Image: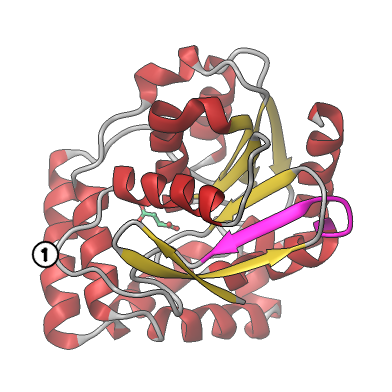
Amino acid sequence: MKRISVNDTQLNVLDAGHGPPLLLVHGFPLDHSMWARQIEDLSGDFRVIAPDLRGFGSSDVTHRTVSMEQFADDLAALLDAVGVTDKATLCGLSMGGYVAWQFWRRHRSRLNGLILCDTRAEADAPEAARARLVSADRAIIEGVGFLADSMIEKLFAPSTLRDRPDIVEGTRSIMLATSPAGAAAAFRGMAARRDSSEILSEIDVPTLVICGEHDVISPVDEMRGIAQRIAGAAFVEIADAGHMSPLEKPREVSAAIGDFLARIA
Ligand code: MLT
């Protein structure tokens, strides 16, 4: 891992392998380690860069609010800081996908392709946004334990919850290690994020959409709809996986990403 200064913060970044650059962007409230198997599987052929976003993992924490635009600007600055001059493919899961839409809006000239995993294009409905702001305050007051308790069951397919306590408990540990201020800042940023549905038809880089069959946070029908609105996008449904498809079915997700990258390289 490296510590890299970007904008007004320092990020903890894994940078492995050589070849066309692949930027892996984690979900909420997690860190780069959710991509461990993809890093292992893909760094033989690609330069894989997997940061902890500000406020997560071992990166520095920014208080109050971090917008999806700020995360996207951090990623662009990170590419500069680690000397990536070629166009990169950005692969984001869930909140990482919210960041990917902003990266497209603000830094599209740096993109060779997009991979959207288990994410949504729509903004929060007003009630959901209000609930996030309440959760942000609650995280500061009482810590992130309630978050892990309320989210964990929604993240995985029934078979993962039943048969893979290692994955479920490993994820819970990462959540519990998240800084309350970091989680709160991202909650506020997600609550305020723009709707990205209208940009789908503008996306003109090769795009892959991946969704776990049992994802209840970003369901298959919604994600298939996202793929249908992006010209030429491929859609891959991962059988027997939920929202955390890269963790639950790592071989299948790595293969989907690897095949896509081999096609567009
Ligand atoms: C995530 O996995 O990043 C979260 O479920 C995103 C969200 O809360 O909308």
Say which residue label 1 marks: 134
Above or below, 232 relative to 22: above
Look at the image and tell me in which quarter the C terminus lies.
top right
Q: Nearer the viewer, residue 15 or 134?
A: 15
Asked if the residue at label 1 sits under 8 Å from ligand 1, the reply is no
Above or below, 31 relative to 191: below
| Residue 241 visible at all | no
Residue 114 image offset from top left, x and y in percent: 61, 34
For the rendered model, the colour scheme is secondary structure
> Which quadrant of the figure has residue 146?
bottom left
Q: Nearer the viewer, residue 99 or 173?
A: 99
Q: Quadrant of ligand 1?
A: bottom left
Amino acid found under the numbered disc labelled 1: Val
State the extent of the magenta-drawn residues as a range: 42-51
Residue 182 image offset from top left, x and y in percent: 28, 71
| Residue 59 visible at all | yes
Position of 132 compared to 197: left or right? left
Look at the image and tell me in which quarter the N terminus lies.
bottom right
Position of 229 compared to 10: left or right? right
